[in-house]
Image (tube, rainbow, N blue to C red):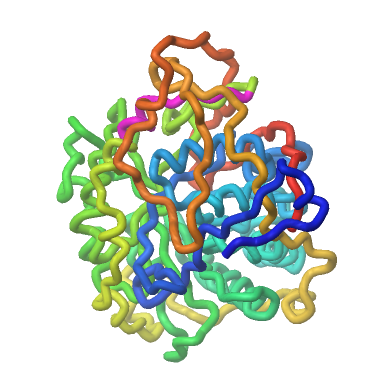
Amino acid sequence: MLRFLNPICAGLLLCATLTSAVQNVKVQGANFVNNVTSDRFQIVGVAYQPGGSDAFSATSDADPLSNGTSCLRDAALMQQLGINTIRVYNVDPTLNHDLCASIFNAVGIYMFIDVNSPLPLQSLDPGNLVTSYSSTYLNHIFSVVEAFGQYPNTLAFISANEVMNTIATGQTAPPYIRAVTRDLKYYISKHMSRPIPVGYSAADVSEILTDSWNYLSCDINGQSSDLSRSDFFGLNSYTWCGPTSLTANYDASGYNTIISTFGNTSIPVFFSEYGCNKVEPRVFDEVPVLYGNMTSVMSGGVVYEYYEEDNNYGLVWIYDNGTAQLRNDYNALQTQYNTLDVKALQSMDSSATSVQSANCSSSLISSSGFNTSWTLPAVPSGGQTLIDNGISNPNQGKLVSVTTTTVADTVYDANSNVIKNLAIKPLADDESNTPNGSNTSGQSSSTTAATPSPTKKGAAGRKEIGVYGLVGLLALSFFFQL
């Protein structure tokens, strides 16, 4: 639908109407599904938060969804790449995310938002679960729900990332992960205008992977309405390393095992991170497989990651002066995406929605040290009041008008040529972004531009517990709220 601006904005020719480019996505059986069209939704995603854990702190503006200027630049590049989903690991719920969320919404890009952060009392501590699971912690994660729950392109919240990564943590953490999922879904049901999926992102640890999935996706006491049941299961997997690696095929990479493991899943399963870089440059030859014979089980994946850092997983360099440059990885991924018929992939697979979830039972667990009790911790003291009444003075996000579509920052292709006329292209209500079959490099100027500043953002290696932060640029101020 078209939303009209207030009279003051309407009198200024600088303003424009806002197009709501996405429909809500829901979970239906083992699929993500467009809530209006009932088409299946396949995640074509990228992780969007550079800088490492050191970049996200109480004193730094490191929230990548709080800077409209950088979001406009990145949304334009992602739209041309073919991305329809971003995953953001850490956000500050006290900041204003309206413009960034509205920009991504306008180009048909959804958001997975992790609710935790590396700051004190803002995540589950596997070594101290009883203390870290507190009303202070709940207040933080509920604040994230308030900040993002009203955006139509918020696809889902991730309740925890790789908290279970050993047999020891598989013994202690599972009931707490289900408790957090329960609390989030209860809060959403009482204070949001629509259901929003909540799920878990798992480490690819073979000893506990199947048990983690079984534990989180089963029905306690046979109750399919149990709020603690995970709505989806994300897997951070880096097993396909190509093209010359011995693991660069369906069987050697273990992708065949993934399909057999999750073949009877009752909830969506997808790669919440993928993109091995042991062999460089990356060519992403797993993409046609993921969106080919794996679609009977998998709901797509999130490439790690958008921004380049010292760990060499990035698609794009970002420089301190605001300019950006595509890496060869961006072009390689775009080439693979452009071979896909994503619209065909979105067609509904009705057989995948008929699998019934299992009743929780110790028979589902195969590891001797993994937790076999589904007695969950009670809501911590003060937490139920937060759930019932809502948090105090929530910062509630809402869509705003996107008044600028042309990217102001200079962006270079992988050959250091300036990309001309870079801009976002707002989509219609019922569209999500898809690969367009063309290459971004084709929009570059024919002459080589000056080399951008060598000072780059980021310098952190990949963390098993997540990826954190981007030192923010200046906030964009030229927008009007609806």
User: At 15% from the left edge and 50% from the top edge, which residue is drawn?
Assistant: 251
Residue 206 within the magenta-colored segment of the rendering: no
User: At 51% from the left edge and 68% from the top edge, which residue is drawn?
Assistant: 24
Residue 331 within the magenta-colored segment of the rendering: yes
The answer to whether residue 175 is left or right of residue 471 is left
The answer to whether residue 286 is left or right of residue 371 is left
Residue 132's place in the image compared with 375, above or below, is above
Image-quadrant location for residue 217: bottom left
Q: Viewer-proximal residue, 46 or 277?
A: 46
Task: Name the quarter where the C terminus is drawn.
Answer: bottom right
Let me know if residue 276 appears in the view: yes
Let me know if residue 208 appears in the view: no
The answer to whether residue 250 is left or right of residue 168 is left
Query: Which segment is the magenta one?
Result: 322-333
Q: Viewer-proximal residue, 19 or 268?
A: 19
Residue 453 image position (x, y, % from top left): 58, 13
Q: Viewer-proximal residue, 401 or 376?
A: 401
Residue 438's place in the image compared with 104, above or below, is above
Residue 280 image position (x, y, % from top left): 30, 26
Residue 100's place in the image compared with 366, above or below, is above
User: At 55% from the left edge and 14% from the top edge, which residue is drawn?
Assistant: 452
Image-quadrant location for residue 177: bottom right
Residue 306's place in the image compared with 15, above or below, is above
User: At 33% from the left edge and 84% from the top edge, which residue is drawn?
Assistant: 356
Task: Name the quarter where the N terminus is drawn.
Answer: bottom right
Residue 168 image position (x, y, % from top left): 47, 60
